[in-house]
Amino acid sequence: MDAAVLDAITTAWKEAGTVVVFTGAGMSTESGLPDFRSSQGLWRSRPESLASLTALETQPDDFYYFYQWRIAKLWAVTPNVGHDILAELERHGRVHQLVTQNVDGLHQRAGAQHVLELHGSLRSVSCRRCRKRYDSRQLLQAAEIDEFAYQSGLYRHGAACFCPCCGGALRPDVVLFGESLPDHAWTEAVRWSGKADLFVVLGSSLLVSPANYLPRLAVEQGAKLLMINQEPTPLDGLATWVLREKCGVMLAQLQSGIVNE
Ligand code: NAD
């Protein structure tokens, strides 16, 4: 990257009183988790309609296979260099709030403390009847994530998908399509975005609302916007800087300039 641009960004980052970092699925592709909408994305092979309560009720085999597959993947990966750097910047007081659309928990596993999860978490599942919460690996017990069986129509969801206490159906603790965002996370995300001096978007297509309202709000309230995404987004025109790079690679280039006095 151009040294002058790098310098301008690190200077703005150091001078900002409040830095809010907003992450999307592109933050975790370098850990090996597919995103949804890029050319390599998950939704190419799996329809968006699977992530809904209607799907749980009407196509339970598809619904549970989809989530067992995602949960298995999520527990098999580890935070990448980008997650580590953000946690490190937080420890140095250079990131004040992380707001994520991700449900993978990788920011927290990297050690970040201040994370607002707008779309819930895939690290746990809950019973729809008695509300008891379990580690999401509960859904994987004795489950075979066998793509061939699924594609051949042979997969059937089993006992692991039901509450060991009351037998109710388990559901992932994510915000499904048609559900509202968790109140606390959303209210806090709006509050932090409104007071940001620098708002950094990492790996998001910014196509999902209402989450994509936050960068716009931040800019309207006077924040500089740094966009790091491999593909164009609808809000690129609002950004002070647009970097078409990988999150981890870019954060590694910026890190020392941000932390050093
Ligand atoms: P998205 O799939 O719509 O967009 C991801 C964007 O990241 C794309 O524009 C892509 O070009 C870019 N990208 C991919 N890898 C990148 C990298 N290494 N560096 C920089 N950019 C990269 O994702 P979204 O905007 O987060 O919205 C989709 C929804 O996806 C969210 O609701 C989220 O809950 C869900 N989701 C989460 C995960 C996860 O938790 N890891 C994974 C898939 C989807």
Image (cartoon, helix red, strand yellow):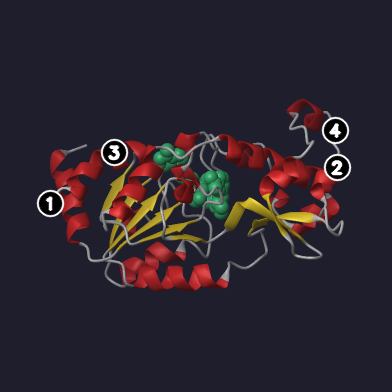
Q: Where does residue 231 sit, x and y in percent of width and height? A: 41, 42
Q: Quadrant of residue 157?
A: top right
Comparing 44 with 51, the one in front is 51
Q: Pointer 1 and pointer 3: residues touching (CB < 8 Å)?
A: no
Disc 1 from disc 2: Cα separation: 56 Å
Q: Which mark is residue 261?
A: 1
Give whichever of discs 1 and 2 has the lower sequence position.
2
Disc 4 from disc 2: Cα separation: 15 Å
Q: Amino acid at mark 3?
A: Ala
Q: Pointer 4 and pointer 2: residues touching (CB < 8 Å)?
A: no
Which residue is located at x 56 percent, y 72 percent?
183
Q: Nearer the viewer, mark 4 or mark 2?
A: 2
Which residue is located at x 54 percent, y 37 percent?
33
The residue wearing badge 2 is 158
Task: Locate the N terminus and report the quarter of the image it occupies.
Answer: top left
Q: Nearer the viewer, mark 3 or mark 4?
A: 3
Give whichever of discs 4 and 2 has the lower sequence position.
4
The residue wearing badge 4 is 153
Which residue is located at x 79 percent, y 53 percent?
56
* Other-residue count near label 4 (Cα within 10 Å), few / some / many at <14 / 14–19 / ≥20: few
Q: Pointer 4 and pointer 1: residues touching (CB < 8 Å)?
A: no
Dot 4 falls on a residue whose secondary structure is: loop
Disc 4 from disc 1: Cα separation: 59 Å
Q: Nearer the viewer, mark 1 or mark 3?
A: 1
Dot 3 falls on a residue whose secondary structure is: helix
Is 156 situated left or right of 1 in this image? right
Q: Pointer 3 and pointer 4: residues touching (CB < 8 Å)?
A: no
The residue wearing badge 3 is 252
